[in-house]
Amino acid sequence: MDLSFTPEQIAFRDEVRAWIREAMPPRIREKADVDGHFEHDEIMEWHRILYAKGWVAPHWPAEWGGAGLDVTRRFILTEELELAGAPALSPFGLTMVGPLILQFGSDAQRRRFLPKILAGEEVWCQGYSEPNAGSDLASLKLSAEPDGKGNYILNGQKTWTTYAQYADWIFVLARTDKTAKKQSGISFFLVDMKTPGVTARPTLTIAGTPAFCDTFFENVVVPAENLVGPLHGGWTLAKALLGHERTYIAAVGLSTRTLRRVKRIAAATKEKGVPLIDVPAWRARIARMEIELWALKMANYRAIASAELGHAPGAESSILKIRGSEIMQQMYELAMDLMGHDSLSWHNEPGTIPEAEASIPPQFNYARAASIYGGSNEIQKNVIAKAILGLPS
Amino acid sequence: MNFDLTPDQKLLESTVASFVKKESPVTRFRALREDPVGYSKSLWKTMAELGWIGLAFPESAGGLGGSFVDVAILLEQFGAGLLPEPYVASVLSAGTAILRAGSAEQHEAFLAPLLAGDTSLALAWAERGGRYDPTWVETAATKKGDDYVLQGEKIFVQNGHAADVIVVSARTAGAPGDSDGISLFVLPRETEGLRITPVKTMDGQRAAMIKLDGVIVPGASRLGPEGAAAPVLDEIMDLGAAAACAEGLGVMRAALAMTVDYLKTREQFGMKIGTFQALQHRAVDMFIRTELAKSTSILASIKVSDPDPAARRFAVSAAKVELAICGRYVTQQAIQLHGGIGITDEHDIGLYFKRMHVLNALFGDEEHHLARFAAQPAF
């Protein structure tokens, strides 16, 4: 066993750190320092900066513009970006549909779509869930019927199409065979959001920001060349997507950064003249949180090391998803508790509460989504029960 | 022992429940989130006419002479319907301050219009450096002839954005943290130098940050003897915490009911998700937590009127900690079991989650009450 990074890996980490300091525009830096909310244009600005550096898609193969980094370096890069508070890039193109097109798409599809994802010229969103197909995704109903002229006609609704209001393209799972077993009649399509009949309606989340959308399809004409993988073979792609890059799902970098914020708030917040970080009860609670985070971090390292040895990521990524989301939620809860009355503040004018705290209340709310999206924690537990513990279904 | 409500209390409970259902469905609260006041002054008047504002005030002050258990019955139903009218701020906080410390003239001037539903009040006590300790008063009240000059800052004053009259704690002697030397002053909203900045709170309600910038108040605006307000504030903190427990119980019960309903109707994998044993057990845990919070809330409701502050503190701190543990669990799991729809603003369940956080953060959070519980001489 060797739990340390190699000197080369440490040198890479230092290089990444120095570059981020250098490359981050002042306007983004200011928000990153207080973990502010990034607007879409700021996210895309940072996307283009990473693109210019060649680090925007570290997990893509070098021939398609990836950074050509091994698993550990990719993890280091991701963690450093999260630690620096850099804007989180839209994952829908880079980590979701991009790798699927690489794996299952035609050459023509790769040439058409991948360079624009990489350059940030086309923004994507995901059309998986429907109002009646959440955890039971395979029961989805968006229909895709051939029109006999080389097109498919899409009708139905997708929900939780996060940031669809900014997207140029959406990838959808649609039903192409209503008679087959439910997993066997699904196909994977790429749909231009500008196609007549596509409507995205943003909805507010409990964080008070419009992240979600409902996206409606009304007689939307999609050319057959936008079908990825085999007809009726979309479920294979859906499952493959879940296996992609699960080592990032624990959000260790984000939680490490939130812990740092927790400590800062605890040092700046006084009770009767004493900083909370010096009050034993608060200190113990922060320490417990940090230890839980370390356990997650080491579990994450183990998963990465295993991936580096060429083992396919298995059901253990479900452990990371469950604990990662729980720890993220508890970390924000701790920050809120430390803030006391300030935690009541909701989207007020700057200066109402200390700037370093201002984004915590919405984040505390939105963190509740982390145990629901990407396969709810209940579904993850089903996966572990069956795939790891071998319990009967 | 007898945990049953009296017939009169049962009648009150069903009256309030149907009032909230009819007059204050959650759709009303949703619309009021956009309103600068955030509640309805005409509904406030109706509540006064029903006798609810004066419910626990003594008959000598124009009230009905009810107990805090009666008040808790109201608050539980208010919590279930997310009713935003400022009962705790006006009645239990500022109202109690005036009742306990004020003179007969002050009762007449400020309590009579409150009980008639013509005004609402606020109590400005919290300061940034003191967290939940009402004796941490940096705001200074300096004597100048027959007047006082008030200088300082109060944060997140409940109903401070809309109150007609604001009761302010200020130090006439001593240092922050001293029990002695705290005085209460009663200020009309229009008082010169009173800078009121409305702020939004997470639960869709409003409050105010208040700066006192050389505010001159006549000596006659002081409530009670100079420097002796700490015991009154201490009692109000306990009333507020017990109120949060009662209201929180209503929040939890509503969140549980909505969730159970959802489990019975939502279908995935070809069946009601309520048939999944893992989810049944979760709902049962939510139910158990709600029952425990109810049990400690009852204890707090009875003991909060105990003349012995130690007995009061024990029960109220226990109940507030239990509220934090149970309320948080129930509202978090309520969102979780609703899935994605629970993360949207358009679904009501998130409103209950937010209100529960606010109730946890008001009148002492979990850590504050744990520390206070452990600091009892008898611990």
Image (spheres, rainbow, N blue to C red):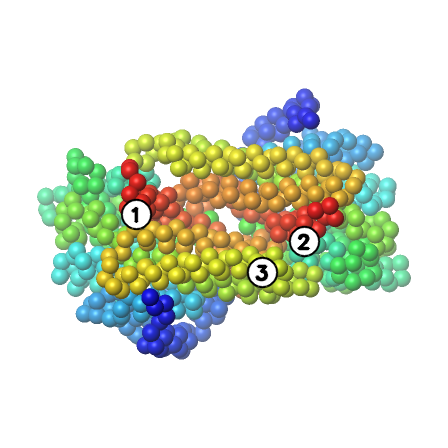
User: Same chain for marks 1 and 3?
Assistant: yes
Residue at numbered disc 1: A388
Horizontal side of A96 relative to A180 (left or right) equals right
Residue that appears at 68% across and 25% down: B2
Find numbered disc 2 in the image and state the secondary structure of the residue it sits on.
loop
Q: Residues within 10 Å of mark 3 (few under 14, many from 20)?
A: some
Check if mark 3's residue and mark 2's residue have beta carbons within 8 Å.
no
Across and down, in percent, residue A358 comes to 53, 60
Marked residue chain, label 3 = A
Residue found 16% across the figure and 59% down from its top: A109
**On the rendered structure, is B321 left or right of B212?**
left
Which residue is more in the foreground, B169 or A62?
A62
User: What x and y, as percent, mark residue A268?
Assistant: 60, 65
Disc 1, SS: helix
**Disc 3 or disc 2, which is closer to the eye?**
3
Residue, disc 2: B132
The outermost residue toward the right is B145
C-alpha span from label 2 to label 1: 48 Å
Query: Tag 3, which secondary structure?
Result: helix
